[in-house]
Image (cartoon, grey):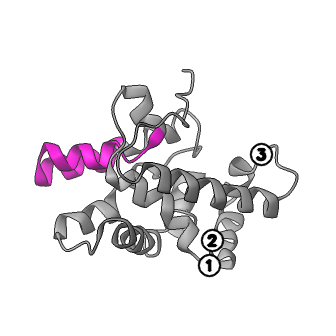
Amino acid sequence: MRVGTRSLLYGAHCWFLHPFFTAWAWWKLYGPPLDPRLWFAFFLHDIGYWGSSNMDGPEGERHPEVGAHIMGCLFGRRWFDLCLYHSRYYSKRAGRSFSRLCVADKLSPALEPRWLYLMRVKATGEVLEYSAGRPSIDDWYAEFRSYMRKWVYAHRDGEEDTWTRAREE
C-alpha cells in the first residue's frame, strides 16, 4: 500500500482524525465552522493523497486537485479554490494566494497531542519523508510544530507568503 493511502487511512491525514483537528484549527482562527460546506472541505481536501507514492514529492504535491474538483462540482468555484489552494506549495506554483483552509490545515498538527501525531506518522512511514536530514524525529517534530505555529500566526489574515518557496519541477 502506498504511503499516501496509508496517510489517509491511519497517518497524518487520517480520515477520522485530521478533519476534526482542521475544524478545531478553523474555529481557533476564524470562529465556528458553521457552514456545512466547510465540513465537506475538511474531509475532502487531502483525498488526493489516495494512491500517492510520496507526500512532498511531485505526486504528493498534486494532492489538492482531487478534493478541489469534488468541491467544485458540489459547491462551485469558490469552494474549488478553497480546497485547491490549501497547499502552500501548490498555491505558490500556481501564482495564487493560499486559502484560509491552508492556514487551518497547517495549524491542525500543532493542536494534536504529540504522541498521537507521532504514533501515526511513524506507523505509516511518512515520518521518514518528513524528517529527512534531521538529527532525530523528536527534533524534527519540535521544529515542525514551532515553524507551523509561526507561519500560521504570521499568515492567518492572508499576508503574502514569503516563507514558502515553490519547488522546481
Determine crowd level at label 2: few under 14, some 14-19, many 20+ residues with C-alpha closer than 10 A: many
Whole-angstrom CA distance, mark 3 to mark 2, is 17 Å
Whichever of callouts 3 and 2 sits on the residue coming sooner in the sequence is 2
Measured from the top left, where is residue 157 in percent x and y?
35, 51
62 or 93: nearer the viewer: 93
For the residue marked with disc 3, what is the amino acid? Answer: Ala
For mark 1, give the secondary structure: loop
- Judge whether 161 appears above or below 134 on screen: above
Residue beneath disc 2 = 117
Horizontal and vertical percent position of residue 96: 33, 31
Q: How many other residues sit within 10 Å of disc 3, few (<14), some (14-19) or many (≥20)?
A: few
Eye-nearest disc, 1 or 2: 1
* Residue marked by disc 1: 113
Provide the secondary structure element on which disc 3 rests.
Answer: loop
| Quadrant in which the C terminus appears | top right
In the image, residue 60 sits, relative to residue 6, either above or below, namely above
Residue at 58 percent of width and 65 percent of height: 11
Residue 132, numbered circle: 3
**Contact check, label 1 and label 2, Cβ < 8 Å:** yes
In-image side of 138 versus 151 (left or right):
right
Q: Is the magenta stretch mostly helix, strand or loop?
A: helix
Q: Picture coordinates of residue 68 (x, y %)?
A: 27, 46
Horizontal side of residue 37 vs 151, given as left or right: left
